Image (cartoon, grey):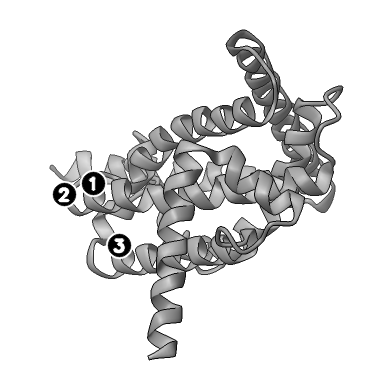
Amino acid sequence: MDAREQFLNYDNKLLKTFLTLFRKPEDVIGSYITGTRKKYVNVLSYFAIALTLSGFQLFILRKFFPESMDLNFITTNESQNITDIDWAFDYYSIFAFINLPMYALIGKLTFLGLKKFNYTEHLVITTYAIAQFSITNLFITTPAAMLGGNFFVIANIMNLLVMIYVAYIYKKLYPLTIGQIILRTLLFLAIIVVILILVGIVQFAFLYFSGDLEEMIRAEREKKAISYIASSIINWTS
């Protein structure tokens, strides 16, 4: 009886946390930061729940709806197939956990000059926000994928909404006007672009100095040559 009551209490706390993160996110996040930890599900547990549910979602879609996970729609070249990305799904939880410090750093840089929250507190904000959106995302992307939609297309559309949601959270946490939060959001996007450019430069340099870049170019040329020869033979024999 006690175990069931504890489970029901936790279940109610989970629902309360989920709903309040939409209505009053500053209450959930502020309570945790100020040390009130019993009112809502704590940030690590909430993130763990989100990862578990996301992992279950990926398992269902990969197992029963593999066509929804097709990435070949991004290329118009029929000779190019993008198929082997299972490793990214297998290590999804690790990637999600590793990305949190980077998101928190971007948040800290975005609101630099407003000294209300330190880096650790930005990490709490980011973790709650990502967990909340991951759980919400399940109720949208999963049914849409089951009904024939492409998981990646839907997920990219949802990524636009997550930026709006994060901006909403920071608007609740900081005394900013709508105009100020829009400017901070643009700064957030600019920082992401700079980081992506830097990562791209590092990756290019690594490929260049390791010799892998030349090998990739040669392999691409060979693939195009084989495709040309094959098409020529088909045309000659038809």
Is residue 81 visible in the rendered image? The answer is no
Disc 1: CA contacts within 10 A as few (<14), some (14-19) or many (>=20): some
Res 146 visible: yes
Residue carrying label 2: 147
Quadrant hosting residue 115: top right
Q: Position of residue 15 (x, y in %)?
A: 40, 58
Q: Position of residue 132 (x, y in %)?
A: 49, 49
Left or right, 157 with reference to 133: left
Which amino acid lies under the numbered mark 1 shown in the image of this protein?
A: Ala
**Above-or-below relation of 167 to 34:** above
Q: Amino acid at mark 2?
A: Leu
| Sequence order check, earlier mark of 2 and 3 | 3
Circles 1 and 3: CB atoms closer than 8 Å: no
Quadrant, the N terminus: bottom left
Q: Residue at x 29, y 70 (%)?
A: 63
Distance from the alpha carbon under mark 1 to that under mark 2 = 5 Å
Q: Residue at x 64, y 46 (%)?
A: 29
> Residue 60, how many percent across, how many down?
30, 67
Mark 1 and mark 2 in contact? Answer it, CB < 8 Å: yes
Gap in angstroms between the C-alphas marked 2 and 3: 11 Å
Residue plotted at (38% across, 69% down): 56
Q: What residue would you read off at disc 1?
A: 144
- Residue lying farthest left? 238
Which residue corresponds to mark 3?
61
> Can you say which quadrant of the picture contains the C terminus?
top left
Near-viewer residue (48 or 87):
48
Residue type of the residue flagged with mark 3? Leu
